């Protein structure tokens, strides 16, 4: 998810990820995790998936939103 040639910001932690719960708004999630990267947006509904990087390559989190609120999340390798 990282853009090449840009200064690397610290990745998110498992503790930050664990603060995100079903029903949390996108604005609240971005206050916790920082700005995410829009990975996918459904054209016929208000669904979207955003992603955040962890500190190591391959460590990341994805959060699914419906109507601007968290409906699911997953992570790999966060510490």
Image (cartoon, grey):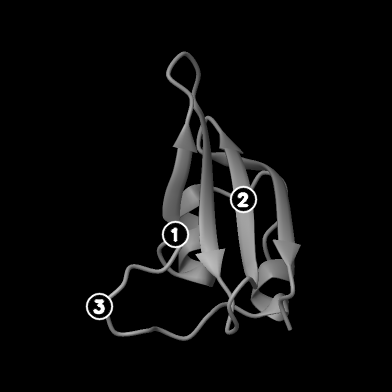
Q: Looking at the image, which residue is at 52% across and 30% down?
A: 67
Q: Residue furthest top?
A: 44
Q: Is residue 54 left or right of residue 40?
A: right
What is the CA distance from the residue labelled 2 to the residue labelled 1? 9 Å
| On-image quarter of the C terminus | bottom right
Identify the secondary structure beneath mark 3: loop
Check whether the beta carbons of the residues at disc 2 and disc 1 lie within 8 A of each other: yes
Q: Looking at the image, which residue is at 48% across and 37% down?
A: 40
Which one is closest to the eye, mark 1 or mark 3?
3
Q: Looking at the image, which residue is at 33% across and 68% down?
A: 3
Which circle's residue, 2 or 3, is located before the other in the chain? 3
Q: Which residue is mark 3?
A: 5
Q: Which mark is residue 36?
A: 1
Q: Give x and y (percent) for residue 37.
A: 42, 55
Q: Which residue is nearer to you in this view: 69 or 72? A: 72
Q: Which mark is residue 63?
A: 2
Q: Is residue 75 left or right of residue 27?
A: right
Which circle's residue, 2 or 1, is located before the other in the chain? 1
Q: In the displayed structure, would residue 74 be above or below residue 7?
A: above
Identify the secondary structure beneath mark 1: loop
Q: Is residue 47 left or right of residue 16?
A: left
Q: Give x and y (percent) for residue 50.
A: 51, 50
């Amino acid at each position: 998810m990282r853009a090449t040639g840009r200064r690397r910001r610290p990745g998110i932690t498992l503790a930050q990820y664990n603060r995100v719960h079903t029903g949390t708004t996108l604005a609240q999630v971005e206050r916790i995790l920082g700005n995410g990267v829009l990975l996918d947006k459904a054209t016929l509904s208000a669904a979207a998936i955003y992603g955040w990087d962890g500190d190591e390559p391959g460590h990341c989190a994805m959060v699914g939103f419906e109507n601007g609120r968290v409906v699911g999340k997953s992570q790999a390798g966060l510490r």
